[in-house]
Image (cartoon, rainbow, N blue to C red):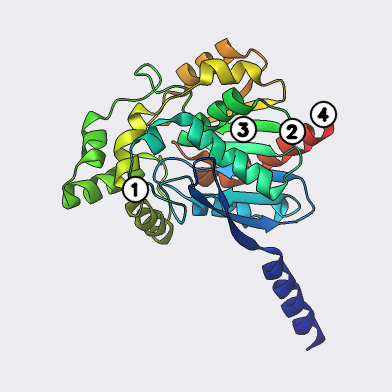
Amino acid sequence: MFAAAVLLMAASAAAAADKEYTVKSSDGVVIAVEETGNPTGQPIVFVHGLLGNRINWDKQTTDPDLQKFRLITYDLRGHGLSGKPDDAEAYQDGRRWADDLAAVLRESKAKNPVLVGWSLGGVVLSNYLAAHGDVGIGGLVYVDGVIELKPDLITPHPEVYAGLASQDLRTHLDTVRTFLALCFKTQPDQATFERLLSNAATASWVMTRTVPSMTVHAEEGLPKAKVPVLLIYGGRDNLVRPKASIARAKSLNDRIGSKIYNKSGHAPFLEEAARFNKDLTEFAVSAEGSN
């Protein structure tokens, strides 16, 4: 009975440590934020990709070995519970996405955080570096990150991107499913896939149509990173080209490190979560020690 009570109290304390709140970006867009893990631990801020939201990181935020960190996730503009402006300029201007991240860092008071950006989240990291530099940042991890929106770095799927931009409801929703499936070499379990699919369907259509023309400042941002930077790519990625992306990033900053997960597609943090979490832990600890 006593043991059960202790476990219940521990579970309640863990739940109480989690919190959700919102911040306002430079243009007034409301950004939804969630925190888990150790409130006094080293911060890790996760930035999801196109048609995702903070639940993409569930295998990180629920991992026992990552609970020593302060885990901060948020929904990009146009996604999840964050604001969804109706004007294309709110999404085309990459600086605004960078300012969203800056608002999260400012309001959370995260000290020397490690920033983790998946897919389109990589663009957000690069644009953040271009706009704000790396002062106060502990390190950056690009996970199958989009370095630049260029044909030599992005695998062509013209029919998919045309379908995502379609104003026909059936075409749009069917293509969202196709796009999500392309993210994985090893598909997630049915419940996880359906949850991710339901979330993807709620993303702003204006945002989805506009993102392909979003401004990307990798050429300005990546050279500014003096802190540790690690690129992790799935070797079987079917959306971005891993080797070409790594080569382009390293041409902009030769201090960047890289790893390829040969069993993964576009989402190694889900497909090889145990390995990813171990690598993230080691990187975060190393980054903290270098500050």
Residue at 73 percent across and 38 percent down: it is 284
> Against 73, is 243 above or below?
above
Spatial CA distance of label 4 from label 2 is 13 Å
Query: x%, y% of residue 135?
Result: 73, 28
Amino acid type for the residue under numbered disc 1: Ser
Query: x%, y% of residue 279?
Result: 67, 37
Q: Which residue is mark 2?
A: 136
Closer to the chain start, of discs 3 and 4, is 3
Mark 1–mark 2 contact, CB under 8 Å? no
Spatial CA distance of label 3 from label 2 is 15 Å
Q: Which residue is mark 1?
A: 204
Residue at 82 percent across and 30 percent down: it is 291
Query: x%, y% of residue 160?
Result: 25, 36
Query: x%, y% of residue 5?
Result: 77, 83
- Quadrant position of residue 151: top left
Mark 4–mark 2 contact, CB under 8 Å? no
1 vs 4, front mark:
1
Secondary element at image label 4: helix
3 vs 2, front mark:
2
Amino acid type for the residue under numbered disc 2: Gly
Q: Which residue is mark 4?
A: 290
Closer to the chain start, of discs 1 and 3, is 3
- Quadrant position of residue 239: top left
Secondary element at image label 1: loop
Mark sitting on residue 63? none
> Against 245, is 33 above or below?
below
Q: Which residue is mark 3?
A: 141
Residue at 76 percent across and 73 percent down: it is 10
Work out whether residue 145 can be spotted.
Answer: no
Closer to the chain start, of discs 3 and 2, is 2
Spatial CA distance of label 3 from label 4 is 15 Å
